[in-house]
Image (cartoon, rainbow, N blue to C red):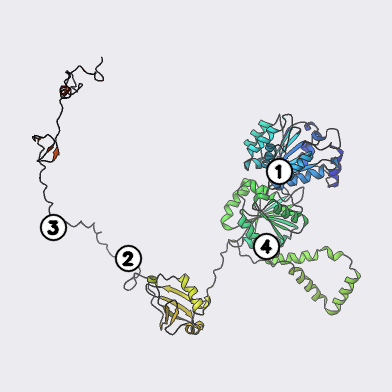
Amino acid sequence: MIAPLTEALAERGYDKLTPVQEAVTAPGLTESDLLVSAQTGSGKTVGFGLAIAPTLLGDAERMGPAALPLALCVAPTRELAFQVMRELSWLYAKTGARVTSCVGGMDMRDERRALERGAHIVVGTPGRLSDHIRRGSLDLSDARAVVLDEADEMLDLGFREDLEFILAAAPEERRTLLFSATVSPPIAKLAEKFQRDAKRINTLGGTSQHADISYQAMRVGQTDSEHAIINLLRYHDSESAIIFANTRAAVNHLTARLGNRGFAVVTLSGELSQTERTHALQAMRDGRARICVATDVAARGIDLPNLNLVIHADLPVNTEGLLHRSGRTGRAGRKGISALIVPPRATKKAERLLKFAKINAEWTVPPRAEDILKRDEDNLMADPAWEEIPTPEQAAFAERLLAEHSPLEIAAACLRLYRAQKCAPEELLAPDAKAPAKDRKPFGPSTWFALSVGHDDRAEARWILPLLCRAGNLEKDGIGAIRVQKSETFVELAQPFVAGFKSALGANGELEEGVRARQLDTPPNLAPAGRSGPPKGPRSFDDSKPRGPRPGPKPYPKRDDKPEAPARAPRPKWQPDTAPDGGLDKAEGKPKFDKPKFDKPKGAKGKPTGKPKAKYAAKGKPAGKGKPHRGQGK
């Protein structure tokens, strides 16, 4: 291995390489194309950084002057591209390599100027890299290696055309390293087209997916999902945690709820600008925020330090989403917990996800309030502050406390102050318990009033209620039932508000806008509209009584009194006109026609083939001497 890279790994605390890093740096693979399958969090970024080092440096230990890029790394998302750039920057820092990025959402002019100054390694997203190549600001003619990180995700996001365009713009003699969680048929087709005798490396066979992650499926009541999330955060008291939701609206709602409870929380979703997303991740890395609520935009490639808790507020869509979400924890040998919030309606879906992902999860319930309070005591007792030697000022203050208070009072106050810094835990229902119905207090004693408007006046309860509150000096709690009838409306008022309502009425009992009110001595009869007579009793289904024959269909009534229609007079027959003028038949008023006579040749069908004799005879031409008729020949 090249010495500058070995020194960088030692400074970062790498005492040994991960399996995928050892596999891609094998001595016989320094010039080969690679098709690598490895789980997320296995050190792939450092792995392909070590794998392309011999191709970029050769026998040298430092890079030459920065000019056209020597290596190109393509990542599916902006966050993953920035993370790859950070990893390669510290890995190649001692070689003098210049690493730059080209990602969507950033200023393209700044990226163009950085490329003009020269770069050894370029990291970017497919769309932005394609734009730079088309505009001539990115020249890959000197590229020696191209790395496709999370290739399956890039194909799922629809970047196939961009990837093919980028690979076609690079020299054919380059090395192509393709990293993917799974080698699906589209990935195999892409590798076959753009790689040369690629060596297949699979590091998934020996170990199960995410062996360092403890999966827990939390059964919660239908209305206790958010309460369970709060209790999980309180119980584990993690240095950093990430909560996944399926929609931006759910992310915003959870962020507001946790912020109101005192948690230091940030948001990560697709609606944020790149600057806002970068600031959110930096707040998590700096420790200014401890909880990140995100959509699946953060499910790939995001590496947050000391992240040991992942909560699925909404179940992922498929097993790939579950694995990549959970892969944010349990990285580089650290342990982590992935908790699925499972309300009763989502139990079957959770079971299918875990089954298809081949994960054995522990089915349990969220921590209860008493468990969290007991955990607070244990955390307080295990705090390293007890082992520190007090300063003289602290010792003097401790003596003053002991002089004024007993040790029991001091210890109790210490526990109260510790819990005051954290939000109170939530009381949870049993997973199969239904939410208790809200007890509605009986309304009364009350008095009824009748208003002079009803359905005929297009009255509705939605405008009568604010009218009563505005003009009747009432509150909503003092108004009971509002029953709109045909010509008037009955309103029930609580007895303490009756006097104030009467004082608000005018001299004629007018409330407002021509609406008058009068007090009723007894509650009104609020029978449903359209019912006449007493209400019908329950139907009888006594089978002991014999049933009569079912009546047949009623015959239609005969209409014998229908008058007969008058008979029509027969139409007169047409007679040929004998009028001397030959124009109109004066008797009938109809035009007169002369039917011409045609020559009928002797044949089987007897169809007329010649011209009318009367026409040619009138002009003095012999019959048959004119222009031959069509079909007669010359």
Estimate how packed mark 3 is, as few (under 14), some (14 to 19) or many (20 or more) residues with alpha carbons within 10 Å. Answer: few
Q: Which residue is mark 4?
A: 258
Residue furthest out toward the front:
620
Q: Vertical placement of 446 versus 550: above or below? A: below
Front residue of 342 and 486 = 486
Q: Which mark is residue 542?
A: 2
Left or right: 479 in relation to 326: left
Q: CA distance from mark 1 to mark 4?
A: 32 Å
Q: Which mark is residue 561?
A: 3
Mark with earlier residue (3, 4): 4
Task: Give the residue type at disc 3.
Answer: Asp
From the viewer's perspective, is the residue at label 1 or at label 4 nearer? 4
Left or right: 45 in relation to 601: right
Q: CA distance from mark 3 to mark 4?
A: 85 Å
From the viewer's perspective, is the residue at label 2 or at label 4 nearer? 4
Q: CA distance from mark 2 to mark 4?
A: 62 Å
Q: Position of residue 82 (x, y in %)?
A: 74, 46
Quarter of the rendering occupied by the C terminus = top left
Q: CA distance from mark 1 to mark 3?
A: 94 Å
Task: Give the residue type at disc 1.
Answer: Gln
